[in-house]
Image (cartoon, rainbow, N blue to C red):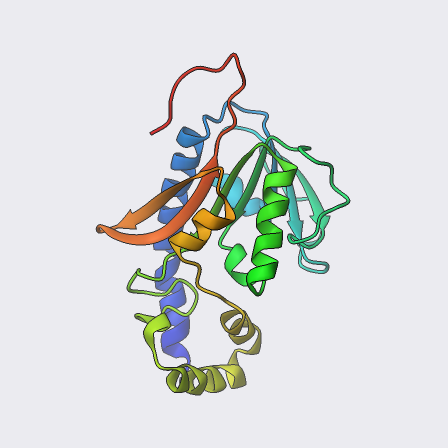
Amino acid sequence: MRYALFHFLLRVKKPFSAAARRRRMEEFTRRMQIRGGERVIDLGGTPEFWNDLATPLDITVVNLPGSNPPGQPQSHHKITMLEGDACDLAALPDQGFDIAFSNSVIEHVGDAARRQAMAREVQRMAPSYWVQTPSIWFPVEAHTMMPFWWFYPGWLQRTLIRRWRRKLPAWTEMVETTTVISRGEMEQLFPGGRIWTERKLGIAKSYIAYRRHEHPNQQGSEA
């Protein structure tokens, strides 16, 4: 029963997370002016994530070796599954996609050098991009579901992690390898883009660095 509350919170979180993803995809569609058929490379995602976007796309999902689900996913999108490291995808061509996309991944790839490497790959592979990461200021931390997790003293974080590791080792490893990324760092990583601060009840929930490449014959503006 020690982890009953944790599993209960996971169940409670699901509908709220799903609603947040739908709203985020609506913004993605609007800000990126999605028309259909765009070639998207999704770094660290899942095919199911795209179910909330009705417009069919040509999506390549890249995950670390052994992380992709078996079999061909059923989707209204064209889905291709690849294995690779989001920080080093040299086998894929420069500007080979229309949009590079990543949701809540860049905070997991490692130290500052790894984050910079992922940002370079994002900007190398596509003229347009959309990269999201949770905000430190949101009261409930997205991975641990603990209030104000990033402000706990180190000894308290280590104590909780030791307890979690006994029962939830894989999840605990994910928590331990998560690095909070500030809006300022996102601006430095993606100097050619804009930063949209996604808010809930007026509080910053996540930061999205995005850039929409405009062809010469495209007109209009983005909010």
On the rendered image, what quadrant is the N terminus found in?
bottom left
Does residue 191 appear in the picture of this structure?
yes
The residue drawn where x is 45% and y is 54% is: 185
The residue drawn where x is 70% and y is 52% is: 88
Please tell me which residue lies in front, 208 or 190.
190
The residue drawn where x is 62% and y is 53% is: 117
Residue lying farthest left? Answer: 201
Q: Where is residue 153 in the image (x, y as percent from the top left)?
A: 35, 82
State left or right for residue 203 relative to residue 84: left
- Where 154 sits versus 116, above or below? below
Q: Where is residue 149 in the image (x, y as percent from the top left)?
A: 35, 72
The residue drawn where x is 59% and y is 43% is: 122
- Where 166 sits versus 146, above or below? below
State left or right for residue 56 relative to residue 200: right
Q: Position of residue 165 (x, y in %)?
A: 52, 82
Q: Position of residue 183 (x, y in %)?
A: 39, 52
Q: In which quarter of the image is residue 146?
A: bottom left
- Where 76 sits versus 187, above or below? above
Please tell me which residue lies in front, 86 or 14.
86
